[in-house]
Image (cartoon, rainbow, N blue to C red):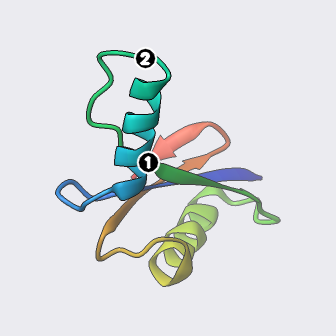
Amino acid sequence: MKARVHVTLKPGVLDPQGKAIEHALGTLGFTGVEGVRQGKVIELDLAETNPAQARKNLHDMCEKLLANTVIENYAIELDGQSAP
């Protein structure tokens, strides 16, 4: 089973990488780009065949390792179906 975890900074948390990307895009001539936020996508191949158990396992992985839940949000996508 294929899974993706999208990790992004929570609103209000400073994003220096996003600001650097925004600035770089401006210097390359891309105008009108504002409020860039940078995140990460983690792709996993899971042996689990039960979607409910896979979501539970992914949630536990995010809470324990994949996301810093103090400053980051995450969304789980399992075989193309998204869920927070």
For label 1, count other residues whose C-alpha is less than 10 Å away and answer few (under 14), some (14-19) or many (20+).
some
Give the residue type at disc 1.
Gln
Residue 54: quarter of image: bottom right
The amino acid pointed to by label 2 is Phe
Q: Give the vertical position of 71 relative to 17 (above or below).
A: below
Residue located at (43% from left, 53% from top): 17
| CA–CA distance in space, label 1 to label 2 | 17 Å
Residue 32 shows in the view: yes
The percent position of residue 33, horizontal first and vertical second, equals: 33, 23
- Which residue position holds label 1? 38
Q: Is residue 5 visible?
A: no
Q: Look at mark 2 in the image and give the residue it sits on.
A: 30
Q: Quadrant of residue 73?
A: bottom left
Give the residue drawn at x 53%, y 70%. 56
* Near-viewer residue (43 or 56): 43
Per the image, label 1 sits on a secondary structure element best described as: loop
Residue 35 x/y as whole percent: 26, 36
- Pick whichever, 41 or 1, lies toward us: 41
Q: Point out residue 83 in the picture as x, y percentages from the top left corner.
A: 44, 48
Sequence-wise first label, 1 or 2: 2
Residue at the image point whose x is 57% and y is 67% from the top: 58
